[in-house]
Amino acid sequence: MQIFFSPTSPYVRKCLVTAYELGLIDLIEFLPANAHPVNRDAHIIASNPLGKVPTFVTDDGAALYDSRVICEYLNALGHGSLLAAEGAARWEALTLQSLGDGILDAALLARYENHVRPEALRWPEWVNGKLDAIRTSLHYLDQHPEVFEAEFHLGLLTIGCALWYLDLRYPELAWREAYPRLAKAAEPVLQRDSMKQSWSMPG
């Protein structure tokens, strides 16, 4: 199995954390990738017309994308319990995954606006809107720390990756200080061995 790899992509990290949890990480080969919204990577496009990471190639040669599909595939392959097959637990995990992905979407869009778009064309109100979406999402989690009491699942995994990305790219948000109940409730997720891993290209 192969994955087009970027060490700072939180969506790639979702897949790697999932693989680690399921004991599959050593079966995955990392492929170099340079995903960019403007200067697109032809190597990724050959497997995924969207040209985005993560793109995953199975042992059968099938290309899978995006992170939601890849994580569910890995959970099925590893006979895992990160996503319930049915019932309320499945919908809770999927909804929290959407919340975590939404935080990441907002964070990435704001970052692209500030670091990729030419300065003269930047839209501060757009960035502020995305940052507000992050804050309202963190506020929700701060008001509902009980969601972290569930058995670890794909939704909590995604929230953990979102918080990791905020630490990486938005330390000025100081989310732990701003949302102390969230910080306390999320700590067991962030302290999982899978979440503390650091991956890089071999060699």
Image (spheres, helix red, strand yellow):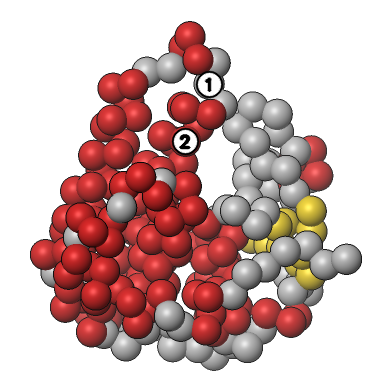
Q: What whole-number distance in Å separates the C-alpha atoms at marks 1 and 2? A: 9 Å
State the residue in front, 73 or 9: 9
x and y percentages locating residue 6 in the rendered image: 67, 54
x and y percentages locating residue 31 in the rendered image: 79, 59
Q: How many marks?
A: 2
- The quarter of the picture where the C terminus appears is bottom right
Q: Considering only vertical position in the picture, is 116 above or below 100?
A: above
> Looking at the image, can residue 115 be seen?
yes
State the residue in front, 94 or 160: 160
Residue drawn at 69 percent across, 47 percent down = 48
Task: Please tell me how crowded label 1 is: few (under 14), some (14-19), or many (20+) other residues with Cα within 10 Å.
Answer: few
- Please, what secondary structure does the residue beneath circle 1 have? loop
- Please, what secondary structure does the residue beneath circle 2 have? helix
Say what amino acid the circle numbered 1 marks: Arg
State the residue in front, 144 or 193: 193
- Write down the residue under mark 2: 111
- Write down the residue under mark 1: 117
Is 29 on the left or on the right of 12, as rendered?
A: right
Asked if labels 2 and 1 touch by Cβ distance under 8 angstroms, the answer is: no
Is 49 on the left or on the right of 186, as rendered?
A: right
State the residue in front, 86 or 129: 129
Say what amino acid the circle numbered 2 marks: Arg
Query: Which residue extends farthest top?
Result: 120
Q: Quadrant of residue 178?
A: bottom left
Residue drawn at 33 percent across, 77 percent down = 187
